[in-house]
Structure formats: structure tokens, C-alpha cells
Amino acid sequence: MTFELAVQIGLIISVASVVATVAGFGNSLVAMPLLISFVGVRTAAPLMALAGLLTWAIRFVVLRRQVRYGLIRQVIAASLVTIPVGVAFVSYGPEVWLRTTLGVMTVAYVVYRWAGRKVPSVEAPAWGLGVGAVGGVLSGAFNTAGPVIVMYGDARRWAPDEFRANLALYFFTNLIMVNATHAVAGNISEVVWAGFLVSVPFVIGGLWIGTRLVRRVNRDRFSQIVLILLLALGLRLALSWLF
């Protein structure tokens, strides 16, 4: 790995960690499209899984007292079952399909957010099983279960504190399984380990910056900037089959 590539990976993951701290999720949504441009899907997915595990382990430790385990346990359980399906998609799916799928998902999420529609309320906890199953596939493939889980949290009307804490627990437990599955599948190569080791100080730095920004930044404006960036990246990936 060249010095230039190492710095690029580190900066991408640092920005993603800032987003995760300020927004409560979204680090992989920001990082994956950029990482794919530099190292490809099959390196980006396990690399972001390792970096994400470190990010969410720290976030979970900070937020653990606000977690409502009863609200999230079914989602986590279902996700753990379907994660290997997503990892298999990364391992064997054609690269252009992987790029296009992630691009379409990213654009769809931006459109959903800009539409401003409130998700209908759901009371039955069984919804968590379906949401978790879909989230597990997305976690295994792209580490991007965030939008699905955010919509579920909105539908269950989670309070802001438990929302951030529940997401931290979900991502932390999910990424343990994602990394274990990548390891069994042989996806964690020397390049992936090198990228992860490079990213460690950038993750910590990004979380430190994000913690301070939370108190000062206008979250709505910050979210709009992130959405514009995601739209551009998503369109680029969704149309990658043209280039």
C-alpha cells in the first residue's frame, strides 16, 4: 500500500467517523462509495467492516447506559442470521452489480430523506425480525444497514437518546458477525489489514472531532451537506456500468 493511498483511506474513514458521531449513523454510507473508487468493493467491504467495528465499539461504550435492549434485540437476532448472505454477495457477485446496487440504495435513501415524509408508526415488535433480516444482508454486503434501521427506529418512535444508543449496539453486534463471516470467507487480506491499521488513528480522531462538533454544528445543515455528497456518490456508483 502506497503512502498516498494510506492517507486517502485514513481521511475517508476519519470523515465517516465524524458523520457517525454527529448523525448517529451513516459512516459506511459516506465511506463505502469513496473507498470503492480507490480499492474496489471486495477490499472496501471488509476494510470498512473492521474500521466500523472500532467506531461502533467506542460509540457503544459511551452510550451503553441509554440502550433499550428490549427494543432492539429482535432486530439484532434476525440480522445475525442473514449477514452471511450479504457477505456471499460481496464474495461472488460481479463487481459492476455490487457498485450499481450500492449506488441505487444510496440515491434511494437521499430521495427518501428529502421527501420529508414521516414513517408510519408500527407497534408490533415482530416488525423487527423483517427489518433485521434486511439489515443483515445490507450489513454483510456493504455495511449499510443504517437507513433501514433508522426508518424502523422512526416507526417505533424511539426517543433521541435511546435512538443513538440502540443504533450503536446494533452496529457493534452486527459488525462482530460481519467481520467473522468475512474472515471465514477469506476476504480479510493483507491489504485489508494494512488499511485497517492505517485507519485506527483516523477513526479515533474523527470521533474526537465529531464529539466536539455535536455541540456546535447545526445538525439539519450538516445533514443536508451529507445528503448532497451522498447523492453525487450514489449517482456515480449507480451509473458505473456506463463507464
Image (cartoon, helix red, strand yellow):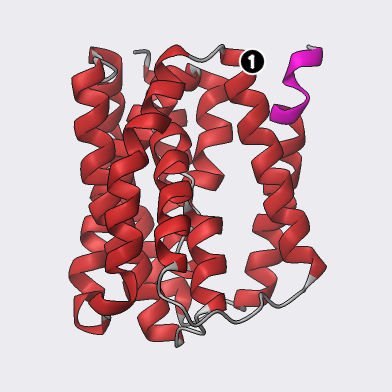
Classify mark 1: helix, strand or loop.
helix
Q: Which residues are magenta?
A: 237-242
Q: Residue at x 43, y 26 (%)?
A: 44
- Judged by its main secondary structure, the magenta piece is helix
Which sits in the foreground, 120 or 168? 120
One can see residue 37 in this view: yes
Give how far across and how far down residue 29 sits, in percent. Answer: 54, 46
| Res 94 → quadrant | top right
Relative to 58, say whether 235 is above or below.
Answer: above
Up the image or down, 136 lies above or below 87; here it is below
| Quarter of image, res 189 | top left
Q: Quadrant of the C terminus?
A: top right
- Side (left or right) of 156 relative to 1: right
On the rendered image, what quadrant is the N terminus found in? top left
Give residue 56's position: percent from left, percent from top. 29, 56
Front position in the image: 164 or 54 = 164
Q: Where does residue 25 sit, x and y in percent of width and height?
A: 46, 61
Type of amino acid under label 1 = Val
Location of residue 207 by image quarter: bottom left
Determine the residue positioned at 49% across, 21% down.
41
Please tell me whether residue 97 is drawn above or below residue 46 in the rendered image: above
Q: Position of residue 132 (x, y in %)?
A: 41, 55
Give 163 or 31, whichever is nearer the viewer.
Answer: 163
Q: Verify whether residue 238 appears in magenta.
A: yes
Identified at 49% across, 45% down, the residue is 144
Q: Is residue 27 above or below residue 63?
A: above
- How many badges with numbers are in the image? 1
**Residue linked to disc 1:** 96
* Extreme-bottom residue of the structure: 159
Q: Considering depth in this image, is 202 or 237 the residue closer to the camera?
A: 237
